[in-house]
Image (tube, rainbow, N blue to C red):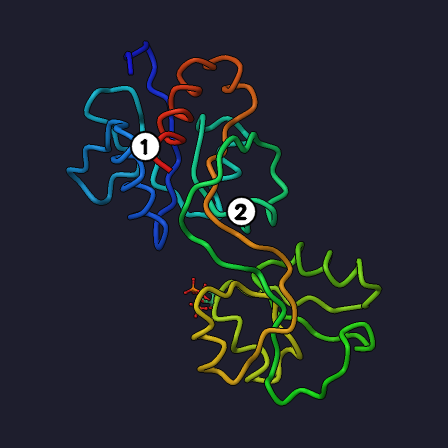
Amino acid sequence: MENTEKPLLFALPKGRMADESLALLSKAGLSEPVDNNDRKLVLESADGCFGYVMAKPWDVPTYVEYGAVDLGICGLDVLRESGRNVHEPLLLPFAHCRLSVAGPANRPDTPLRYESQPRVASKYPRLAAQFFRERGVNAEIIGLTGSVELGPILGLADLIVDLVETGNTLRANGLIEFRTIMESQAVLIVNRASSRLRAAEIQSVVERLRAVI
Ligand code: PRP
């Protein structure tokens, strides 16, 4: 890709999606971050075409919507919860999981719609509230930022809405899945203005990634 006056800013998720994101860039032949200092948050690519911003996954949609970066990689779960308005040109083949309603395995077999005011712990308060609202269930959503499975164990919540990948965490904590709210995987997202103003460069990134997935 040709260098222009300004590198494209690309937000990559730190944490469990980082390795697969970097591996995909490499496979697509996109110039990778030159990482000479692991505390540095903006890393230039060797060819100067990209500035890679290592971001908390939950912040990626915000950076992209506001144009703080031109494009980014995050999970569909995080994107839908954020409600951010961005282009989504490409689903990426990793971070497959689902957002599910789960609860204690020994819970009485009551259909969710007959639950009166269940307390639901979640890192996804918007999606959880929407799911129960659409089913006419008056749920109280309790926002947590991690280890949501503790909710029913500690008596904080009747149910949880959380990500399930292998199901190991649920099983280890005596919980089972009741419903799938959505399937999730990684997604490439693009700022709406950047997709017009830097259309050729962004199209080239999309095509290179598309070619290897
Ligand atoms: C996620 C999710 C579940 C677990 C699911 O948590 O919130 O707890 O992974 O994976 P599994 O079905 O393969 O067991 P994460 O590890 O990101 O930590 P957190 O709960 O502290 O956010």
Please tell me how crowded label 1 is: few (under 14), some (14-19), or many (20+) other residues with Cα within 10 Å.
many
Ligand 1 visible in quadrant:
bottom left
Residue depth check, mark 2 versus mark 1: number of the one nearer the observer:
2
Q: Position of residue 73 (x, y in %)?
A: 43, 39
Which residue occupies the foreground of this view, 127 or 177?
177
Judging from the image, what secondary structure is the residue with disc 1 in? Answer: strand
Q: Residue furthest top?
A: 5
* Residue at 60% across, 50% down: 81
Q: Residue furthest left?
A: 36
- Location of the N terminus by quadrant is top left
Is ligand 1 within 8 Å of the beta carbon of the residue shown at mark 2?
no
Left or right for 177, reference 23:
right
- Location of the C terminus by quadrant is top left
CA gap, disc 2 to disc 1? Answer: 20 Å
Q: Which mark is residue 67?
A: none
Residue of label 2 = 76
